Image: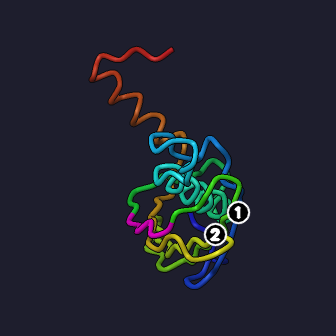
Amino acid sequence: MINDSLRVGATHSRTIEVDRERTISFLGEDLRIYATPKLIDDIEQTCLDYLLDFVDKGENSVGTAVDIAHTGATLLGVRVRIEVKVASIDGRAVKFDIAVFDDIEQVCTGSHSRFVVNVEKLKARVGEKASRAGIVSA
């Protein structure tokens, strides 16, 4: 369950450098800019890491929705600051408002939702689904 100390309005931020792995390649070397899928991954990871401080042992969270506008190009080697704010808490569901800034400007706005899960229960449900699909786990 989500710890009562997590409150609507709580904020967290993370600063990262846009490395080569986070950039697009299809526009050539002169336009190595932050790829939207990598930005989304960094947003999800920032929210996940923050939320883990507020859940019980044996629990984690999964992403359930992402809605962003990636409005600015951030070049390879430039830092970004991902700011997340708890917008709502509904039982095990948490929604975050998102703002991302590089060293020059705001490059993203949006929201991200996560759901707190019991890892063992999720593992059992996924295992049952895999069994029904004929998938043998390793």
Decide: marks 2, 1 in contact (CB < 8 A)?
yes
Question: Residue 64, percent across and down?
Answer: 40, 57
- Residue drawn 46% across and 17% down? 137
Answer whether residue 85 is magenta in the image. Answer: no
Q: Nearer the viewer, residue 89 or 86?
A: 86
Tell me the quarter of the image containing the N terminus.
bottom right
- Residue drawn 59% across and 73% down? 84
Residue for badge 2: 102
Question: Mark 1: which secondary structure?
Answer: strand
Question: Residue 119, percent across and down?
Answer: 54, 43
Q: Residues within 10 Å of mark 2 (few under 14, many from 20)?
A: many
The residue type indicated by label 2 comes to: Asp
The residue type indicated by label 1 comes to: Arg
Instruction: State how many labels appear.
Output: 2
- Its colouring scheme is rainbow
Rendered image: mark on residue 62: none
Q: Which region of the structure is painted magenta? A: 67-72
Q: Residues within 10 Å of mark 1 (few under 14, many from 20)?
A: some
When the figure is inspected, residue 6 is found, relative to residue 125, above or below; the finding is below
Q: Nearer the viewer, residue 53 or 100?
A: 100
Question: Residue 129, percent across and down?
Answer: 32, 30
Residue for badge 1: 79
Q: Main secondary structure of the magenta part?
A: strand
Q: Nearer the viewer, residue 71 or 69?
A: 71
Q: How far apart, in angstroms, are the residues tagged by discs 2 and 1?
A: 6 Å
Question: Mark 2: which secondary structure?
Answer: strand
Question: Residue 101, percent across and down?
Answer: 61, 73
